[in-house]
Amino acid sequence: MTASYETIGTRQDGNVLYANFDAPPMNLIGPELVRDLVALIEELSHPTAPRVVVFDSADAEFFLPHVDMTKVPEYTAEAAKAGGPGDASLGMLFRKLSLLPVVTIAKLRGRARGAGSEFLLACDLRFASREKAVLGQIEVGVGAPPGAGAIQHLTRLLGRGRALEVVLTSSDFDADLAERYGWVNRAVPDDELDEFVAGVAARIGGFPRDALISAKAAINDISLPTPAEVRADAALFQQLVRGGKAQQRTAELFDEGFQTRGGTELDLGDALGRLKAVD
C-alpha cells in the first residue's frame, strides 16, 4: 500500500492493513471521507493488496456517526466516482467494499448510526466493544428509509421482525443486543477488543489468498443483495431525504445541536423520539 489519505490513516502489519478513520470533529461521512473510501477501495482491489483490512476509528466516541446532512449532494458526487453517475450512491460504493478480494473487518468503538452502520454491514466481519459501541439506523426517524444497504443486510442477518424493529424504531442498540440480534459477530470487552481483532486478522491473513477469495465470493453469491435492490433503496432514500418532512425534522435536530459533539449526537436515538410528530 502506497497511497495516503486525508481522513483515513493506514499502517500495514504483514498481510493485514489497519485503516483508521480520522475526520475531525466527529467522523461524519462527508465528501472528503467518501473520496478517501473510493480511493482506498480501488487500491484494495489490486492483486497486491493485503489479504485483510481492519477498519477502526481514531475517535473513541464516534466510529462513523452518520452522513453529513449538510453535504448530501457533495458526498453522493464523490461516491459516483467509484462506479459512474448511474451508481451515485453510498449503497453501491459499500457493495463494492463487500465484493473486494480482501477480508474486511470492522472494529467498533463509539457510535455507528445510519450510513455508519451500513458501512459496518458491508464489511465481512464486525466486532464491537461491549462497553463503548452504539449502533442505530436513524433514517426513518429523520423521514426516509435507509438507502445504503441496511434494509437488505439487516433483513438477511436479523430476520424480518428484528430488522423491522431496528429500522422502524430508529433506536440506539448496545453491543450486547446487537450481538444477540446478529448485527455484529461478537461483543467483546473493550480492554480485550484490540488483541482479539488483531488475532483474528492475523490468523485469516496467514491463510492462502486464493482460498480466502474463493470462499468469500461463494458466500457473497448467496448473501449479497443485487445491484438492482441496492439502487432501488438508494433512489427512495435520496427522494425522501430531500422532502419537506425530512427537512423539517432535520432542522429540529440542528436546533438541538445535531452534528456537534456537545449536542444530540450522544443520545441521538432518544432525540429522534422527542421530535414533533408529523403526518
Image (cartoon, rainbow, N blue to C red):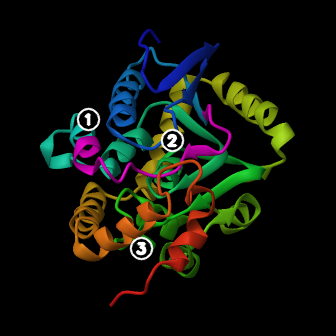
CA gap between label 2 and label 1 equals 21 Å
Label 3 or label 1, whichever lies nearer to me, is 3
What is the C-alpha distance between the residues marked 3 and 2? 32 Å
* Callout 1 crowding tier (Cα within 10 Å): few <14, some 14–19, many ≥20: many
Q: Which amino acid type corresponds to the residue marked 3 in the rendered image?
A: Val
- Residue drawn 58% across the image and 77% down it: 162
Question: Is residue 168 shown above or below 86?
Answer: below
Which mark identifies residue 271?
A: none
Residue named by callout 1: 82
Disc 3 to disc 1: CB gap under 8 Å: no
Q: Residue furthest bottom?
A: 279
Report which residue position mark 3 lands on: 140
Q: Along the polypeptide, which appears first: circle 2 or circle 1? A: 1
Q: In the rendering, at what x and y percent does residue 85 appear?
A: 13, 43
Disc 2 packing (10 Å; few <14; some 14–19; many ≥20) = some
Compared to residue 196, the image places residue 258 above or below, namely below
- Is residue 234 found left or right of 120 in the rendered image? left
Compare marks 3 and 2 and give the one earlier in the sequence: 3
Circle 1: element type: loop
Q: Nearer the viewer, mark 2 or mark 1?
A: 1
Q: Considering depth in this image, is 78 or 23 the residue closer to the camera?
A: 23
Q: Which residues are magenta?
A: 57-76
Cα distance between the residues tagged 3 and 1: 27 Å
Q: Quadrant of residue 51?
A: top right
Q: Amino acid at mark 2?
A: Lys
Task: Tell me the residue that label 2 is attached to.
Answer: 216
Return the residue nearer the eye: 102 or 67. Answer: 67
Please identify the quarter of the rendering in which residue 181 is found.
bottom right
271 on left or right of 146: right
